[in-house]
Amino acid sequence: MEVVASAPGKVLVAGGYLVLERPNPGLVLSTTARFYAIVRPIHDELSPDSWAWAWADVKVTSPQLSREAAYKLSIKNSTLQLTSARRSTNPFVEQAIQFSIAAAKVSITDKEKKDALDKLLLRGLNITILGSNDFYSYRKQIEARGLPLTPEVLLSLPPFCSITFNSEVANGTGEICKPEVAKTGLGSSAAMTASVVAALLHYLGAVNLSCSGQSSSVTATGRDFDFVHAIAQSAHCIAQGKIGSGFDVSAAVYGSHRYTRFSPEILSSAQVIGGSCLPDVVADIVTRRWDHEKTQFSLPPLMCLLLGEPGTGGSSTPSMVGSVKQWQKSDPQKATDTWSKLGMANSVLENQLRSLSKLSEDHWDAYESVVRSCSRLTFMKWTEVATNQQQELIVKSLLAARDAFLEIRLHMREMGVAAGVPIEPESQTQLLDATMNMEGVLLAGVPGAGGFDAVFSVTLGEASGAVANAWSSVGVLPLLVREDSRGVSLEAGDPRTEEVSTAVSSIQIS
Protein backbone atom coordinates (compact mmCIF):
# COMPACT_ATOMS: atom_id res chain seq x y z
CA MET A 1 0.00 0.00 0.00
CA GLU A 2 1.51 3.28 -1.13
CA VAL A 3 0.23 6.79 -1.88
CA VAL A 4 2.22 9.36 -3.86
CA ALA A 5 0.95 12.95 -4.07
CA SER A 6 2.60 15.99 -5.59
CA ALA A 7 2.14 19.76 -5.39
CA PRO A 8 3.60 22.52 -7.58
CA GLY A 9 5.79 25.53 -6.93
CA LYS A 10 4.54 29.01 -7.81
CA VAL A 11 5.34 32.32 -9.50
CA LEU A 12 3.40 35.44 -8.46
CA VAL A 13 3.40 37.50 -11.67
CA ALA A 14 1.21 40.35 -10.36
CA GLY A 15 -0.04 41.46 -6.96
CA GLY A 16 3.23 41.51 -5.00
CA TYR A 17 2.70 43.13 -1.56
CA LEU A 18 -0.92 44.03 -2.38
CA VAL A 19 -1.97 40.38 -2.04
CA LEU A 20 -1.08 40.59 1.66
CA GLU A 21 -4.26 42.57 2.31
CA ARG A 22 -7.83 41.74 1.39
CA PRO A 23 -9.48 42.33 -1.05
CA ASN A 24 -6.42 42.82 -3.30
CA PRO A 25 -5.91 39.86 -5.66
CA GLY A 26 -2.73 38.29 -6.98
CA LEU A 27 -2.14 36.40 -10.22
CA VAL A 28 -0.22 33.24 -9.33
CA LEU A 29 0.99 30.60 -11.78
CA SER A 30 1.78 27.05 -10.70
CA THR A 31 4.77 25.39 -12.30
CA THR A 32 6.30 22.15 -13.53
CA ALA A 33 8.48 22.13 -10.40
CA ARG A 34 6.78 19.77 -7.95
CA PHE A 35 7.29 18.31 -4.50
CA TYR A 36 6.40 14.65 -4.02
CA ALA A 37 5.36 12.92 -0.79
CA ILE A 38 5.38 9.13 -0.69
CA VAL A 39 3.48 7.49 2.20
CA ARG A 40 3.58 3.79 2.99
CA PRO A 41 3.31 1.69 6.18
CA ILE A 42 6.41 0.83 8.20
CA HIS A 43 5.10 -2.56 9.41
CA ASP A 44 3.56 -5.10 7.04
CA GLU A 45 0.98 -6.14 9.61
CA LEU A 46 -0.14 -5.43 13.17
CA SER A 47 1.24 -7.44 16.06
CA PRO A 48 -1.35 -9.11 18.37
CA ASP A 49 -0.85 -6.50 21.10
CA SER A 50 -0.99 -3.47 18.77
CA TRP A 51 -4.22 -2.15 20.28
CA ALA A 52 -2.45 -1.71 23.60
CA TRP A 53 -0.02 0.73 22.04
CA ALA A 54 -0.54 4.43 22.67
CA TRP A 55 2.17 5.37 20.19
CA ALA A 56 2.90 4.67 16.54
CA ASP A 57 6.16 4.90 14.60
CA VAL A 58 6.75 7.66 12.05
CA LYS A 59 9.81 7.86 9.81
CA VAL A 60 10.53 10.85 7.54
CA THR A 61 13.25 10.70 4.88
CA SER A 62 14.51 13.47 2.57
CA PRO A 63 17.14 11.71 0.42
CA GLN A 64 18.27 14.87 -1.41
CA LEU A 65 19.19 16.54 1.88
CA SER A 66 20.50 13.35 3.53
CA ARG A 67 17.91 13.93 6.26
CA GLU A 68 16.19 11.21 8.23
CA ALA A 69 14.08 11.56 11.37
CA ALA A 70 12.20 9.07 13.54
CA TYR A 71 9.25 9.99 15.73
CA LYS A 72 6.69 8.48 18.06
CA LEU A 73 3.13 9.55 17.24
CA SER A 74 0.58 9.89 20.01
CA ILE A 75 -2.51 8.05 18.78
CA LYS A 76 -4.67 10.11 21.15
CA ASN A 77 -3.34 13.62 20.53
CA SER A 78 -1.93 13.29 16.97
CA THR A 79 1.36 14.85 18.15
CA LEU A 80 4.92 13.83 17.35
CA GLN A 81 7.87 13.23 19.66
CA LEU A 82 11.28 13.14 18.01
CA THR A 83 13.33 10.05 18.89
CA SER A 84 16.29 10.38 16.51
CA ALA A 85 17.42 12.59 13.61
CA ARG A 86 20.18 12.81 11.05
CA ARG A 87 20.64 16.54 10.31
CA SER A 88 18.08 19.09 11.48
CA THR A 89 14.34 18.36 11.35
CA ASN A 90 11.86 20.28 9.23
CA PRO A 91 9.06 22.12 11.08
CA PHE A 92 6.89 22.32 7.94
CA VAL A 93 6.94 18.54 7.59
CA GLU A 94 6.27 18.01 11.30
CA GLN A 95 3.29 20.36 11.33
CA ALA A 96 1.95 18.88 8.09
CA ILE A 97 2.01 15.39 9.64
CA GLN A 98 0.39 16.43 12.93
CA PHE A 99 -2.33 18.58 11.34
CA SER A 100 -3.13 15.93 8.70
CA ILE A 101 -3.53 13.11 11.22
CA ALA A 102 -5.65 15.30 13.51
CA ALA A 103 -7.75 16.36 10.51
CA ALA A 104 -8.30 12.75 9.44
CA LYS A 105 -9.45 11.86 12.96
CA VAL A 106 -11.83 14.85 13.04
CA SER A 107 -13.30 14.19 9.59
CA ILE A 108 -13.92 10.45 10.01
CA THR A 109 -16.85 9.89 12.38
CA ASP A 110 -17.99 6.36 11.49
CA LYS A 111 -16.75 3.95 14.21
CA GLU A 112 -15.72 1.25 11.77
CA LYS A 113 -13.72 3.75 9.71
CA LYS A 114 -12.18 5.20 12.87
CA ASP A 115 -10.97 1.73 13.86
CA ALA A 116 -9.52 1.25 10.38
CA LEU A 117 -7.74 4.61 10.67
CA ASP A 118 -6.19 3.66 14.03
CA LYS A 119 -5.05 0.32 12.61
CA LEU A 120 -3.42 2.15 9.71
CA LEU A 121 -1.63 4.51 12.06
CA LEU A 122 -0.44 1.64 14.28
CA ARG A 123 1.29 0.11 11.27
CA GLY A 124 3.43 3.26 11.22
CA LEU A 125 3.99 5.96 8.63
CA ASN A 126 7.01 5.87 6.34
CA ILE A 127 7.14 9.24 4.56
CA THR A 128 9.63 10.08 1.80
CA ILE A 129 9.85 13.64 0.47
CA LEU A 130 11.37 14.66 -2.88
CA GLY A 131 11.60 18.03 -4.60
CA SER A 132 12.21 18.78 -8.28
CA ASN A 133 15.66 20.17 -9.02
CA ASP A 134 14.04 23.47 -10.05
CA PHE A 135 13.39 24.39 -6.40
CA TYR A 136 17.12 24.47 -5.63
CA SER A 137 20.03 26.48 -6.93
CA TYR A 138 22.85 24.54 -8.56
CA ARG A 139 24.52 27.68 -9.87
CA LYS A 140 27.59 27.48 -7.61
CA GLN A 141 28.22 23.85 -8.52
CA ILE A 142 27.92 24.65 -12.24
CA GLU A 143 30.29 27.61 -11.95
CA ALA A 144 32.76 25.59 -9.87
CA ARG A 145 32.93 22.98 -12.64
CA GLY A 146 33.51 25.68 -15.26
CA LEU A 147 30.32 24.79 -17.13
CA PRO A 148 28.12 27.31 -18.98
CA LEU A 149 25.00 28.71 -17.31
CA THR A 150 22.54 27.06 -19.70
CA PRO A 151 19.35 24.99 -19.41
CA GLU A 152 21.17 22.11 -21.08
CA VAL A 153 23.59 21.86 -18.13
CA LEU A 154 20.67 21.84 -15.68
CA LEU A 155 19.01 19.15 -17.77
CA SER A 156 22.12 16.98 -17.47
CA LEU A 157 21.70 16.77 -13.69
CA PRO A 158 20.03 13.57 -12.45
CA PRO A 159 16.42 14.01 -11.25
CA PHE A 160 16.14 14.77 -7.51
CA CYS A 161 19.82 15.60 -7.35
CA SER A 162 21.61 15.78 -3.99
CA ILE A 163 21.56 19.29 -2.55
CA THR A 164 24.63 21.07 -1.22
CA PHE A 165 24.28 23.08 1.98
CA ASN A 166 25.79 26.56 2.06
CA SER A 167 28.82 26.95 4.32
CA GLU A 168 28.12 28.00 7.89
CA VAL A 169 28.46 31.75 8.33
CA ALA A 170 28.43 33.98 11.37
CA ASN A 171 25.57 36.40 11.89
CA GLY A 172 25.85 39.92 13.32
CA THR A 173 26.15 38.67 16.91
CA GLY A 174 29.02 36.35 16.14
CA GLU A 175 26.89 33.21 16.47
CA ILE A 176 27.20 30.49 13.86
CA CYS A 177 24.07 30.27 11.72
CA LYS A 178 22.72 26.95 10.56
CA PRO A 179 23.71 26.14 6.98
CA GLU A 180 20.98 26.99 4.51
CA VAL A 181 20.05 25.50 1.17
CA ALA A 182 20.18 27.85 -1.80
CA LYS A 183 16.74 28.02 -3.43
CA THR A 184 15.17 29.60 -6.51
CA GLY A 185 12.12 31.18 -4.84
CA LEU A 186 9.41 28.85 -6.15
CA GLY A 187 7.72 28.32 -2.77
CA SER A 188 9.36 25.06 -1.75
CA SER A 189 7.99 25.03 1.81
CA ALA A 190 4.41 25.56 0.60
CA ALA A 191 4.67 22.89 -2.11
CA MET A 192 6.29 20.44 0.30
CA THR A 193 3.66 21.07 2.98
CA ALA A 194 0.78 20.66 0.50
CA SER A 195 2.22 17.43 -0.93
CA VAL A 196 2.64 15.86 2.54
CA VAL A 197 -0.86 16.94 3.63
CA ALA A 198 -2.46 15.66 0.42
CA ALA A 199 -0.63 12.32 0.53
CA LEU A 200 -1.48 11.71 4.21
CA LEU A 201 -5.13 12.75 3.96
CA HIS A 202 -5.61 10.47 0.95
CA TYR A 203 -3.67 7.61 2.57
CA LEU A 204 -5.75 7.89 5.75
CA GLY A 205 -9.05 8.01 3.83
CA ALA A 206 -10.02 11.58 4.72
CA VAL A 207 -10.08 12.74 1.06
CA ASN A 208 -10.15 11.13 -2.38
CA LEU A 209 -7.79 12.77 -4.85
CA SER A 210 -7.97 10.05 -7.48
CA CYS A 211 -9.13 12.35 -10.27
CA SER A 212 -7.07 15.43 -9.41
CA GLY A 213 -4.67 15.27 -12.32
CA GLN A 214 -7.37 15.07 -15.00
CA SER A 215 -8.47 18.71 -15.02
CA SER A 216 -7.83 22.12 -13.48
CA SER A 217 -8.07 21.90 -9.71
CA VAL A 218 -9.72 25.31 -9.46
CA THR A 219 -12.89 24.14 -11.21
CA ALA A 220 -12.97 20.45 -10.29
CA THR A 221 -12.01 20.27 -6.63
CA GLY A 222 -14.98 20.53 -4.30
CA ARG A 223 -14.74 19.61 -0.66
CA ASP A 224 -11.62 17.42 -0.88
CA PHE A 225 -9.31 20.09 -2.27
CA ASP A 226 -10.75 22.74 0.06
CA PHE A 227 -10.02 20.38 2.96
CA VAL A 228 -6.42 19.87 1.81
CA HIS A 229 -6.09 23.65 1.43
CA ALA A 230 -7.36 24.41 4.95
CA ILE A 231 -5.02 21.89 6.58
CA ALA A 232 -2.00 22.86 4.46
CA GLN A 233 -2.51 26.59 5.15
CA SER A 234 -2.81 25.91 8.89
CA ALA A 235 0.28 23.72 9.08
CA HIS A 236 2.32 26.12 6.94
CA CYS A 237 1.38 29.19 8.98
CA ILE A 238 2.21 27.49 12.30
CA ALA A 239 5.53 26.21 10.95
CA GLN A 240 6.65 29.63 9.69
CA GLY A 241 5.44 31.38 12.83
CA LYS A 242 3.14 33.87 11.13
CA ILE A 243 -0.02 34.06 9.05
CA GLY A 244 1.04 35.13 5.57
CA SER A 245 -1.08 35.80 2.51
CA GLY A 246 -1.17 32.08 1.65
CA PHE A 247 -0.98 32.49 -2.13
CA ASP A 248 1.90 30.00 -2.32
CA VAL A 249 -0.04 27.27 -0.49
CA SER A 250 -3.16 28.07 -2.52
CA ALA A 251 -1.22 27.65 -5.77
CA ALA A 252 0.27 24.39 -4.48
CA VAL A 253 -3.25 23.04 -3.88
CA TYR A 254 -5.37 24.59 -6.64
CA GLY A 255 -2.82 25.37 -9.38
CA SER A 256 -2.70 28.60 -11.41
CA HIS A 257 -5.41 31.09 -10.43
CA ARG A 258 -6.37 34.58 -9.33
CA TYR A 259 -6.13 34.59 -5.54
CA THR A 260 -7.51 36.77 -2.75
CA ARG A 261 -6.25 35.92 0.73
CA PHE A 262 -8.27 34.48 3.62
CA SER A 263 -9.01 36.51 6.74
CA PRO A 264 -6.19 35.91 9.26
CA GLU A 265 -8.77 35.50 12.05
CA ILE A 266 -9.64 32.07 10.64
CA LEU A 267 -6.42 30.75 12.15
CA SER A 268 -6.78 32.49 15.52
CA SER A 269 -7.24 29.16 17.34
CA ALA A 270 -4.15 27.69 15.67
CA GLN A 271 -2.02 30.58 16.92
CA VAL A 272 -2.52 29.53 20.54
CA ILE A 273 -1.95 25.87 19.87
CA GLY A 274 0.56 25.56 22.74
CA GLY A 275 -1.92 24.64 25.47
CA SER A 276 -4.63 23.14 23.29
CA CYS A 277 -5.45 19.67 22.09
CA LEU A 278 -4.54 19.54 18.41
CA PRO A 279 -7.69 17.68 17.27
CA ASP A 280 -9.84 20.39 18.91
CA VAL A 281 -7.85 23.11 17.14
CA VAL A 282 -8.20 21.35 13.79
CA ALA A 283 -11.93 20.81 14.36
CA ASP A 284 -12.29 24.55 14.86
CA ILE A 285 -10.25 25.37 11.73
CA VAL A 286 -12.12 23.06 9.36
CA THR A 287 -15.56 24.21 10.54
CA ARG A 288 -14.80 27.88 9.95
CA ARG A 289 -15.81 29.51 6.67
CA TRP A 290 -12.62 29.98 4.70
CA ASP A 291 -13.16 33.20 2.76
CA HIS A 292 -10.21 33.06 0.35
CA GLU A 293 -11.22 33.59 -3.27
CA LYS A 294 -9.89 31.70 -6.26
CA THR A 295 -10.79 32.22 -9.89
CA GLN A 296 -9.39 30.19 -12.74
CA PHE A 297 -6.52 31.94 -14.48
CA SER A 298 -3.53 30.86 -16.54
CA LEU A 299 -1.41 32.22 -19.36
CA PRO A 300 -3.11 32.45 -22.77
CA PRO A 301 -2.17 29.80 -25.35
CA LEU A 302 1.20 29.96 -27.12
CA MET A 303 2.73 31.93 -24.25
CA CYS A 304 5.65 30.58 -22.24
CA LEU A 305 6.78 31.34 -18.70
CA LEU A 306 10.57 31.51 -18.34
CA LEU A 307 12.48 31.97 -15.06
CA GLY A 308 16.07 33.01 -14.53
CA GLU A 309 18.47 32.99 -11.59
CA PRO A 310 20.63 36.15 -11.66
CA GLY A 311 23.04 34.97 -8.97
CA THR A 312 23.48 38.48 -7.55
CA GLY A 313 22.70 37.54 -3.95
CA GLY A 314 19.50 36.53 -2.19
CA SER A 315 16.78 38.72 -0.70
CA SER A 316 14.88 38.31 2.56
CA THR A 317 11.17 38.50 1.74
CA PRO A 318 10.06 38.94 5.40
CA SER A 319 12.39 41.91 5.96
CA MET A 320 11.32 43.50 2.66
CA VAL A 321 7.66 43.09 3.57
CA GLY A 322 8.37 44.56 6.99
CA SER A 323 10.02 47.62 5.44
CA VAL A 324 7.08 48.17 3.07
CA LYS A 325 4.61 47.92 5.96
CA GLN A 326 6.67 50.44 7.94
CA TRP A 327 6.58 52.82 4.97
CA GLN A 328 2.79 52.42 4.77
CA LYS A 329 2.53 53.56 8.37
CA SER A 330 4.95 56.46 8.00
CA ASP A 331 3.48 57.85 4.76
CA PRO A 332 -0.09 56.51 4.51
CA GLN A 333 -1.25 59.00 1.85
CA LYS A 334 1.57 58.21 -0.57
CA ALA A 335 1.27 54.49 0.18
CA THR A 336 -2.47 54.48 -0.49
CA ASP A 337 -1.96 56.37 -3.77
CA THR A 338 0.78 53.96 -4.93
CA TRP A 339 -1.26 50.89 -3.99
CA SER A 340 -4.28 52.28 -5.81
CA LYS A 341 -2.25 52.78 -8.99
CA LEU A 342 -0.73 49.32 -8.66
CA GLY A 343 -4.16 47.80 -8.15
CA MET A 344 -5.52 49.43 -11.29
CA ALA A 345 -2.51 48.37 -13.38
CA ASN A 346 -2.78 44.79 -12.05
CA SER A 347 -6.45 44.76 -13.02
CA VAL A 348 -5.68 45.99 -16.55
CA LEU A 349 -3.02 43.31 -16.99
CA GLU A 350 -5.41 40.58 -15.81
CA ASN A 351 -8.22 41.80 -18.06
CA GLN A 352 -5.98 41.94 -21.13
CA LEU A 353 -4.61 38.44 -20.53
CA ARG A 354 -8.16 37.15 -20.06
CA SER A 355 -9.18 38.96 -23.24
CA LEU A 356 -6.35 37.24 -25.12
CA SER A 357 -7.48 33.85 -23.84
CA LYS A 358 -11.02 34.60 -25.03
CA LEU A 359 -9.79 35.81 -28.41
CA SER A 360 -7.83 32.57 -28.81
CA GLU A 361 -11.04 30.61 -28.19
CA ASP A 362 -13.17 32.67 -30.56
CA HIS A 363 -10.66 33.35 -33.35
CA TRP A 364 -7.94 30.72 -33.10
CA ASP A 365 -6.51 31.08 -36.61
CA ALA A 366 -6.15 34.85 -36.27
CA TYR A 367 -4.74 34.48 -32.76
CA GLU A 368 -2.17 31.86 -33.73
CA SER A 369 -1.08 33.88 -36.77
CA VAL A 370 -0.59 37.08 -34.74
CA VAL A 371 1.23 35.44 -31.81
CA ARG A 372 3.61 33.49 -34.04
CA SER A 373 4.32 36.57 -36.16
CA CYS A 374 4.87 38.79 -33.11
CA SER A 375 7.19 36.17 -31.60
CA ARG A 376 9.72 37.08 -34.31
CA LEU A 377 9.40 40.86 -33.89
CA THR A 378 10.06 43.52 -31.26
CA PHE A 379 6.92 45.11 -29.76
CA MET A 380 7.36 48.24 -31.89
CA LYS A 381 6.58 46.22 -35.02
CA TRP A 382 3.64 44.18 -33.69
CA THR A 383 1.01 46.47 -35.19
CA GLU A 384 2.40 45.69 -38.66
CA VAL A 385 1.24 42.06 -38.52
CA ALA A 386 -2.50 42.88 -38.19
CA THR A 387 -4.35 42.62 -41.51
CA ASN A 388 -7.97 42.48 -40.28
CA GLN A 389 -10.13 43.61 -37.35
CA GLN A 390 -9.69 40.41 -35.35
CA GLN A 391 -5.92 40.56 -35.60
CA GLU A 392 -5.96 44.25 -34.66
CA LEU A 393 -7.86 43.39 -31.45
CA ILE A 394 -5.28 40.74 -30.59
CA VAL A 395 -2.33 43.07 -31.15
CA LYS A 396 -4.10 45.82 -29.19
CA SER A 397 -4.52 43.47 -26.21
CA LEU A 398 -0.89 42.35 -26.40
CA LEU A 399 0.36 45.94 -26.33
CA ALA A 400 -2.10 46.94 -23.59
CA ALA A 401 -0.91 44.03 -21.41
CA ARG A 402 2.69 45.11 -21.99
CA ASP A 403 1.95 48.75 -21.10
CA ALA A 404 0.08 47.71 -17.94
CA PHE A 405 3.04 45.60 -16.84
CA LEU A 406 5.47 48.48 -17.44
CA GLU A 407 3.27 50.60 -15.19
CA ILE A 408 3.30 47.87 -12.53
CA ARG A 409 7.09 47.80 -12.64
CA LEU A 410 7.24 51.60 -12.35
CA HIS A 411 5.07 51.75 -9.23
CA MET A 412 6.87 48.77 -7.67
CA ARG A 413 10.19 50.58 -8.15
CA GLU A 414 8.72 53.75 -6.63
CA MET A 415 7.47 51.76 -3.66
CA GLY A 416 10.88 50.16 -3.23
CA VAL A 417 12.67 53.52 -3.23
CA ALA A 418 10.19 54.99 -0.74
CA ALA A 419 10.45 51.95 1.58
CA GLY A 420 14.22 51.66 1.20
CA VAL A 421 14.17 48.11 -0.18
CA PRO A 422 15.36 46.81 -3.59
CA ILE A 423 12.03 45.53 -4.97
CA GLU A 424 13.39 45.96 -8.50
CA PRO A 425 17.14 46.56 -8.07
CA GLU A 426 18.95 48.62 -10.70
CA SER A 427 20.77 45.54 -12.00
CA GLN A 428 17.42 43.82 -12.52
CA THR A 429 15.92 46.90 -14.17
CA GLN A 430 18.62 46.94 -16.84
CA LEU A 431 18.17 43.21 -17.50
CA LEU A 432 14.37 43.42 -17.62
CA ASP A 433 14.33 46.46 -19.90
CA ALA A 434 16.68 44.71 -22.31
CA THR A 435 14.55 41.55 -22.15
CA MET A 436 11.29 43.40 -22.84
CA ASN A 437 12.87 44.96 -25.93
CA MET A 438 13.70 41.55 -27.42
CA GLU A 439 11.68 39.89 -30.17
CA GLY A 440 8.59 38.09 -28.93
CA VAL A 441 8.76 39.21 -25.28
CA LEU A 442 5.47 40.27 -23.71
CA LEU A 443 6.48 40.68 -20.05
CA ALA A 444 9.65 40.61 -17.96
CA GLY A 445 9.77 41.33 -14.24
CA VAL A 446 10.70 40.26 -10.73
CA PRO A 447 8.17 37.83 -9.21
CA GLY A 448 6.43 38.20 -5.86
CA ALA A 449 8.16 40.52 -3.42
CA GLY A 450 10.98 41.19 -5.88
CA GLY A 451 14.64 41.51 -4.95
CA PHE A 452 17.66 39.67 -6.31
CA ASP A 453 16.37 36.08 -6.18
CA ALA A 454 14.84 35.61 -9.62
CA VAL A 455 13.49 37.18 -12.80
CA PHE A 456 10.71 35.96 -15.04
CA SER A 457 9.59 36.52 -18.58
CA VAL A 458 6.45 35.69 -20.56
CA THR A 459 7.29 35.12 -24.20
CA LEU A 460 5.30 34.50 -27.37
CA GLY A 461 5.59 31.40 -29.53
CA GLU A 462 9.14 30.04 -29.65
CA ALA A 463 10.85 33.21 -28.41
CA SER A 464 11.86 31.74 -25.03
CA GLY A 465 14.95 30.07 -26.52
CA ALA A 466 16.45 33.38 -27.64
CA VAL A 467 15.68 34.93 -24.25
CA ALA A 468 17.34 32.00 -22.46
CA ASN A 469 20.46 32.43 -24.63
CA ALA A 470 20.55 36.18 -23.97
CA TRP A 471 20.23 35.62 -20.22
CA SER A 472 22.98 33.00 -20.24
CA SER A 473 25.32 35.43 -22.03
CA VAL A 474 25.00 37.97 -19.19
CA GLY A 475 25.35 35.50 -16.32
CA VAL A 476 21.68 34.72 -15.67
CA LEU A 477 20.94 30.99 -15.39
CA PRO A 478 17.69 30.13 -17.27
CA LEU A 479 15.73 27.53 -15.31
CA LEU A 480 13.86 24.57 -16.80
CA VAL A 481 10.62 25.38 -15.01
CA ARG A 482 7.51 26.31 -17.02
CA GLU A 483 3.86 26.95 -16.17
CA ASP A 484 1.76 23.88 -15.37
CA SER A 485 -1.73 24.87 -14.22
CA ARG A 486 -2.31 21.64 -12.22
CA GLY A 487 -2.48 21.84 -8.45
CA VAL A 488 -2.21 18.93 -6.02
CA SER A 489 -2.20 15.62 -7.88
CA LEU A 490 -2.18 11.95 -7.05
CA GLU A 491 0.71 10.26 -8.87
CA ALA A 492 0.95 6.78 -10.34
CA GLY A 493 4.08 5.86 -8.41
CA ASP A 494 7.47 6.84 -7.03
CA PRO A 495 8.81 9.68 -9.23
CA ARG A 496 12.33 8.28 -8.99
CA THR A 497 11.41 5.47 -11.37
CA GLU A 498 12.87 5.98 -14.81
CA GLU A 499 9.48 6.26 -16.52
CA VAL A 500 8.18 9.05 -14.26
CA SER A 501 11.50 10.92 -14.21
CA THR A 502 11.64 10.89 -18.00
CA ALA A 503 8.09 12.24 -18.19
CA VAL A 504 8.93 15.05 -15.77
CA SER A 505 12.00 16.05 -17.79
CA SER A 506 10.04 16.10 -21.04
CA ILE A 507 7.42 18.39 -19.50
CA GLN A 508 10.09 20.78 -18.22
CA ILE A 509 11.78 21.32 -21.58
CA SER A 510 8.66 21.38 -23.77
Image (cartoon, rainbow, N blue to C red):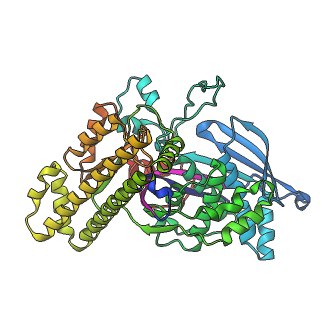
| Relative horizontal placement of residue 352, taking residue 182 as reference (left or right) | left
Nearest the camera: 71 or 329?
329
Observer able to see residue 41 = yes
Nearest the camera: 453 or 105?
453
Q: Quadrant of the N terminus?
A: bottom right
Q: Which residue lies furthest to the bottom in this view?
A: 110
Q: In the image, what residue occupies the spot 81% across and 75% down?
A: 111
Nearest the camera: 357 or 289?
289
Observer able to see residue 209 = no
Q: Position of residue 52 (x, y in %)?
A: 92, 59
Q: Position of residue 372 (x, y in %)?
A: 18, 56
Q: In the image, what residue occupies the spot 58% across and 56% down?
A: 194
Q: Position of residue 94 (x, y in %)?
A: 70, 49
The magenta stretch spans which residues? 24-40
Q: How many numbered callouts?
A: 0
Q: Is residue 36 magenta?
A: yes
Q: Does the magenta stretch include residue 435?
A: no
| Relative horizontal placement of residue 35, taking residue 340 as reference (left or right) | right
Nearest the camera: 172 or 448?
172
| Relative horizontal placement of residue 412, taking residue 203 as reference (left or right) | left
Residue 347 location, quadrant? bottom left
- Is 169 located above or below residue 133 in the figure? above
Q: In the image, what residue occupies the spot 57% across and 46% down?
A: 130
- Is 142 located above or below residue 130 in the figure? above
